[in-house]
Amino acid sequence: MGGGAERVSLQLHQAGLDRGIDSHLAVGFRFGDTPHTAEIPNDANRSWWARNVLRAVPALPPPPATLSPEAVALRRGLKAIAEPGRALRRAQGLEDFDYPGTMAVLAPEGVVPDVVHLHNLHGGYFDLRCLPEISSHVPVVATLHDTWLLSGHCAYPLECERWRTGCGECPHLDTYPAVARDSTEQNWQRKRDLLSRSRLHVVGPSRWVLDRAADSIVAAGAVQMRHIPNGVDQRVFTPGDKQAARRELGLPTEPLMLVFSAAGRTSAYKDVGTIAASLSAIVELVAPRPVLLVSLGAWIEDDRTPGAEVLSVPFTPDPRVVARYLQAADLAIHAARAETLGLVILEAQSCGLPVVATAVGGIPETIADGVTGLLVPPEDPAALARAAGELLLDAPRREAMGTAAIERARSLFGLDRMVGAYFDLYGEVAQRA
């Protein structure tokens, strides 16, 4: 469990099991105990030399734990020794597709599937070169949780438009997933070739990402494109008693409480800096009321703003804990440089919180501006502070927005609605095949 892509794939897998469908989840790294979940056997399919060297590689810990910098360096060094050619290609800036167990998705746990559903493929486990062959054997649904398939390396191109014409001269080599050198044109061409020889039923959680897919190399391999918004389990993310939630979490009951969440490896695209920079202005606007900012999954350091307390909570994969923090808050704030939809925004609204968020990517599809929250320009701490202060000072408006947010989330972004749409699609593509 990490960000939105992991949560959606797990929700769909569990929904299949609940419906009596023979569902299997093929993952790069297995940390939990969800039934019918199997690791793709990449290391087991490597050379004898690589297998023996890789035995000394430090194991990835389950979230939210991380490896120490020393362990990361050791892991990288041992992998370079195990597969020097692969390490050289990565040093040249070529995206790493060397995952020799990928074809096992055609028979996870020995079962041949009727449909394969692919989620994010850049997590260090999937060989994109297998995509044409996989999609020639079985119908493939591919959900674009970000725009990595469109580009020469990045999960989001930010302001760059070179993904439309071939990449190269990349202005953001260090954005996730980073590359060592600018081979983005070669990476883009390789993806274009693979996608043109594939057959994909493409799904976008937002119309924003589908519009970009239609103008990209993904379109060449798309049998169809469909809009299915992410869904929220509203049995978990539901309004709750604010003071009771604060007491349970050990939080003070007096301050006005803001909550921000940035879970998952792509949190580099969340704008923690704008959140931190807006805090002093928010405090000035709502004085003399104290302010508590709770940041879930992202570390914010601020011990210099009088009247404000910042609490950084480590990432938790347990949605019930996230829901409890949302139930304890007065307002959710969300700053991002790029976002396909914004699952945490939907979760906050399902808990009855209005949301102040930056108008990037698919975020405007999640918020009815002025009705369920407020949209502000990206990377503008002053605008974020003004909007947040405006709502914190107006409790009746917050309450009205929260009620509207619940109604909108239930009608458009429910878990059952998402699951039903995906299983309808599975049935259609399997019958067509």
Image (tube, grey):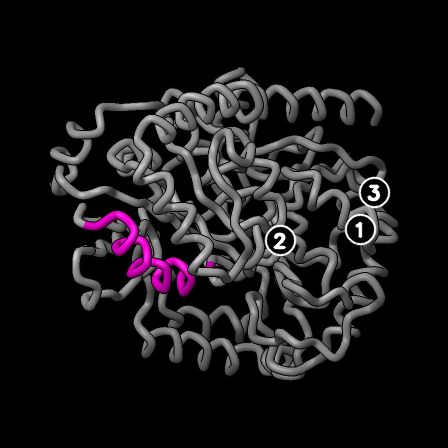
Q: Is residue 44 visible?
A: no
User: Tags 3 and 1 in contact by the CB under 8 Å rule?
Assistant: yes
Task: Give the secondary structure at mark 3.
Answer: strand
Residue appearing at x 48%, y 19% in the figure: 407
Residue appearing at x 54%, y 37% in the figure: 9
Image quarter in which the N terminus is found: top left
User: Tags 3 and 2 in contact by the CB under 8 Å rule?
Assistant: no
Q: Write down the quadrant of residue 78 in the picture.
A: bottom left
- Relative to residue 51, is residue 386 depicted above or below? above
Q: Amino acid at mark 1?
A: Val
281 falls in the magenta region: yes
Image disc number at residue 121: 2
Between disc 3 and disc 2, the foreground one is: 3
> How far is mark 1 from mark 2, CA to CA?
14 Å
Image disc number at residue 388: none
Image disc number at residue 218: 1
Magenta segment boundaries in residue numbering:
271-287
Q: Amino acid at mark 2?
A: Leu
Q: Where in the figure is residue 260, as x and y percent of width and height?
A: 36, 48
Q: Where in the figure is residue 310, as x and y percent of width and height?
A: 22, 56
Q: Where in the figure is residue 375, as x and y percent of width and height?
A: 53, 44
Q: Which residue is mark 3?
A: 222
Residue appearing at x 77%, y 76% in the figure: 168
Left of 244 or right of it: where is 322? Answer: right
